[in-house]
Each structure stands twice: as C-alpha cells, then as structure tokens.
Amino acid sequence: MDRLLARFAQEVDTAVEIVTIYEKAGIQKELVDEEYFLSLQSTHPSSAWFERKIHDDFGLKIAKGYDNRPFWQHETMPSITAMKKSFQATSQIERSTTPQPYRYKTIKGEGVFQVSVGPIHAGIIEPGHFHFSQAGEQILHLDIRHGYKYRGIEKMCEGKSLDALFPLLSRVSGNESIAYQIALYQLKEQALKKEITPNLTHAILLELERLVHHCTDIGFIPNDAGFGAALSMASLLAEESKRILFTLTQSRFGFESIGKDIALQHKKNELQTYIDKMNSEIQWFENWIMDIPSLWDRLDTTGILTAKQALLYDTVGVVARASGLKLDRRDSSFYRHYGYALQREKKGDVAARFILRIKEIKNSLKIIENMLNDVTEYQIIEEKTYHDGEYLSYVESSIGELMMYLKLKEGVVERLFIRDPSFINWQVLHLMMPRDIIADFPLINKSCDLSYAGADL
Amino acid sequence: MIKFWKKRIQNKLLTEHLTHDKTLSTLQKELKSSIAKQFASSLNIRMVDSGSCNACESECNALSNPYYNLERLGIQFVASPRHADVLLVSGVNTFNMHPHLLDAYAQMPSPKYVITIGDCPLTETSVYEDSFAIVGDVAKHLPVAHHISGCPPSPDEIIVGLLEFLKGLDKS
Ligand code: SF4
C-alpha cells in the first residue's frame, strides 16, 4: 500500500482543491465541486485527522468517513472556515453562546466507565485530552482529542515572504525547532531554483536536537515507571546537549540558527569534548539500566504496536522503527557516508522504543563526530529572487518525518501546509492501549513522546 | 544498583548556582509580611501551558535536573491547581485553552498569584501574530503578579525570576 503522507485543502481561484500526498504516487489533486469530499478513512485510517481539519479549515463535509467530528473547532469556537482567503488572520472572533458538545468515541456496557483526562495534566506537559473507556483497570479504548493549542499558524504564514517565516517556524514546536527550520530552508533553496544540498552544519545541529530529545526521553520513560534515578542521570545528558547547542547557536533550542553562519568550524574542540563525554556517559547509562529487572518488567510487552498496525496507520519515526519499519528520511548515501545506520527494533513495545532511542543516541554521536572533520565555512544564501511554484521538503526530526508543502505565488506564501510527525503518530496511540492498564498510559505515551504543539498548528 | 552508587559518589555534588540558597535564606529573614515568609519556605507552583511551543515547559522540567535542583529551595511543581500558590502560565493563551486557563485559576485556593513565563503570554513580545485563534495578553485576563521574560528563559533565569517574585511579595 502506498504510504499516505498528508491530505489538506487549498483554494484555487474560487474553488477548493483537495491535495493528497503519497510516498510513491506523489501529489494528487481533486477539485471539490460539492459541499463534501470523499473520505479515505476506510483504506488509510490516518486520513481521519487530516480530513477533520479540512472540514474545519474550509467547511467541507466528510462523506463516507467513520470520524467526521470537528478538529480544532472546539465547543465555543464559531465556524469560521479560517483557511478560506476571504477570512482574515487578524479577525476577532466571538465565542459561540451555543456550544456544540464534542462526541467522544466510547465503549459502553455493564460496568464499563469513562475516565476523562486533560486538557491540563498533572505534570509539566502540554494540553490535550485523553478519554478512556475502562473495564476496571483495563483500558478498552482511548479517544485522543487535540486542538487546544491551535494558534492558526498556517493562516499566519500566508502572504509572508519565506525569509520572514524563520522566527515563527522556529517556535512552532520547541523540540523540533531545528528540523522545522531546515525544512523551511529546503523550501527556500528550491524556490531559488537551487538544488537541495546536504549541509553539514545543519545536519550536526539536527543530530544535537535529536540528542536533547532522546536523552530527555530515556529519563522520563523509566521515571513514568517509577524509576526516578534514571531521570536524574539522563537529564544531565539532556542538559549537556542543550548547553552545547547554546554554545553553538546562542539558543538552548537552536531557535533561528539555520541560514546563519554560526562558524561551526571554529567550535570543533568544544563539540569533540562534548561527544567524548557523552559517549562514555551513555555507555555507562546503558550498562546500568539494562541490568534493572524490575524496570524491564514494566517496559517489556507494554504498549505493543505491531508492524502491520504501524504500516496501516502510515506511522513514521521512532514509533515506526520500533515496530520494525524501515523508515527514516536520513537513510541516504550522504548520511551513510558519515556512519549513519538505520536503527530498528522488532517488538514494538515500550522497551523497543526505549532501546531504539539509546541506539539512536549512539549513532547520532558517531555521525556528528564524523561530520565534524569535514565542516568548513558556511555559505549564506544571498539571493532573493524566488520562483513561484509548489515545493515539498522532508526532514527527519527527533520524532519522525516532518513534511512541508509550499505554494508560492508572486513571491509570497499562498499556502503552507506542515505535517508534523506527531500528527500521524498520535492517531495510532490508541492501538497500543487495549492490552494494558490505565496506569501504563503515561509510560506508553512518553515512549512515543509526541508533540502536542506540532499536532496543533 | 551498586553501579549507580559508585557513579553517585564519583559525580559528587553537581548542583550549580549555589548562591541562590544564600539569597533565599537572606530573603527569608528580610521578608516582613507573613504570607511572603510562608511562601519563601515553600512555594507550590502549578504550571499551565496556554499554547506554547513546549520549550518553556522543557526548561521548567530542566529545573529539577541535578544542575539546578530547584526543589532544594523549597519550590516545587504540583499536580493540581488546588495544591498551588502560584499559577505559572506559558504560551500565547489560545482561544481553545482560554476557558481552561481561567478554570485552573478559579480552582486555586487563596492567597494565589499568577506568574507568566516566556515572551508568548505578552502579545507585544510574542512572535505570534494576534490571530483569530489567540486571545493573547494573559495580564488582561488574570491578575499577573510577576513576569519572567525570555524565549525561553533559561532555567537559571527562571529561578532568579521566582526569587524576585518572592521579594516583590513583601512590597505588595
Ligand atoms: S516564549 Fe518562546 S520558548 Fe516559550 S513557549 Fe513561547 S515561543 Fe516557546
């Protein structure tokens, strides 16, 4: 089956066009001349959220879909069909006085009860809603709801030049800032009719961002199983990684660092010291944590996603690779030349996602070290003559494949669609639940570590 | 676990910025109002993300790593607004989060304070446009007692900001 990458709509003159992007078949378009469009949900379950978003963006109805609930249009949000050109980004909207209740998908039956969690959670985390149908401790079904952080980013980008977008796109999802900037940079290269050339500075920064994220996760996953010592140890590694990012880019998250000369060639020593330290620390961490049976009792066989399910739901990134799929945008001759090797696990459980992250940390350190030798002066693009057209870019962020679609018209953004890896992966999370108890939910959720901000543009 | 304890002994004390301890203990002596005195030895914070990019949250999480070790100062993040003295608000205050943000504040017992964190909660410093989906300026909707600026503020800047808030309490 051809992998579905994205599905969204855009206005062409006065009509609305549905754009569907597949891995092999590429961009497919169809004009909608009715009030509705035909759903793909029966063949690609992951098209559900895309289609629900199209409904909110343009007011089109979903025909023959099993899920046609609103997405970012919450109870008191009026129907504003925000992505139509007639709607202004800076409009003031009034809260609707007749709220439309949201219909959670639940399982009903004798003794079955519902547990509602969120949007505000107990930890320091982003807002989202989780609705569980429970039989005692056993999870029967989980319905996930997002849209709380909806900021209208796609709309905000319209009418702007590409260069003006860097500050904003740096801050869509803090964990993936560098990936977002590189994706935007690649769109820029294409619009300037340049080839996308692999850039060592960018690649190193991207791996550092992955290190921050993965190191944070290998602490928080055991922590959610009640093993706090791992968090203390791993958070040191995450902190070191943020600090080296700061040394290089003056921002602990690398905000607004792509497209600028950060003179990496003069900071090789600092990076090398960091890598040496990290190599020995991660090795210590692995030896230590592999040897704690009570922890593995919780991680093993918890939150299983089979390869078949991962494929059916078009999943990407860590989640897909931990279930055995060979899917990584870095899988190219450029990266392999610098020691990249695709890391995979088979079991698809929390343990697999945890181990995969440790393996990827080691591989990222190796890639950076090898790339470091070849780093030379950074070439800044000075040209400003952008060519109108449609462009696509892909970057493997720390979560998974990030995709951007750009339509440039008269030198400014006509439509920018961003498909965060989380947007796809959130939709498969519920399949990891039915064999587990509700107390395992935080653990499973953390093992996937998806972005809420990335799903809620 | 023997591996762990060996490592612990080898690592020694990693906490940096130890001067904060001194600042806090002097502060505790200097504070006059009883509320401020009480808070200075135990400040419970409930963080609410009203539409952030998650970097501000990431830095608040970093506060508990051994380098910053915030809890040693008696300041801790709690799981419910009902346990909290301070509502720490990050993010742009989106249309969809706004009612929940107000709800969380309403759930807190008095005396209660609001601190905003990051450039997002102030429309003029935020990189986000004042769009249809954003209600914006948290201070227009909640009584903000203190603001910690930065995008994101570093963990140390957050600690300094919290201590400043405590100092300011005496004046109010
Ligand atoms: S202030 Fe900056 S770092 Fe904090 S949430 Fe906003 S954009 Fe992110």
Image (cartoon, coloured by chain):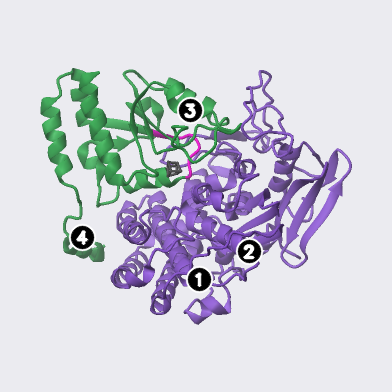
Chain colours: A purple, B green
- B52, A70: nearer the viewer: B52
Mark 3 → mark 4, Cα distance in angstroms: 40 Å
Percent across and percent down for residue A56 are 71, 37
Quadrant, the C terminus of chain A: top right
Determine whether the beta carbon of the residue marked 4 sits less than 8 angstroms from the nearest atom of ligand 1. no
Crowding near the residue tagged with mark 1, few <14, some 14–19, many ≥20 C-alpha atoms within 10 Å: few
* Horizontal arrangement in the rendering, residue A286 relative to residue A255 (left or right): left
Which three-letter amino acid code belongs to the residue tagged 4? Arg
Which three-letter amino acid code belongs to the residue tagged 3? Leu
- Residue beneath disc 3: B101
- Residue beneath disc 2: A192
Crowding near the residue tagged with mark 2, few <14, some 14–19, many ≥20 C-alpha atoms within 10 Å: some
Quadrant, the N terminus of chain A: bottom right
Mark whose residue sits in front, 1 or 2 = 2
For numbered disc 2, what is the local secondary structure? loop
- Residue beneath disc 1: A199
* Horizontal arrangement in the rendering, residue B136 relative to residue B74 (left or right): right
Picture quadrant where residue A236 is located = bottom left
Mark whose residue sits in front, 1 or 3 = 1
Chain of the residue where label 2 is placed in the rendered structure:
A
Determine whether the beta carbon of the residue marked 2 sits less than 8 angstroms from the nearest atom of ligand 1. no
For numbered disc 3, what is the local secondary structure? helix
- Residue beneath disc 4: B8
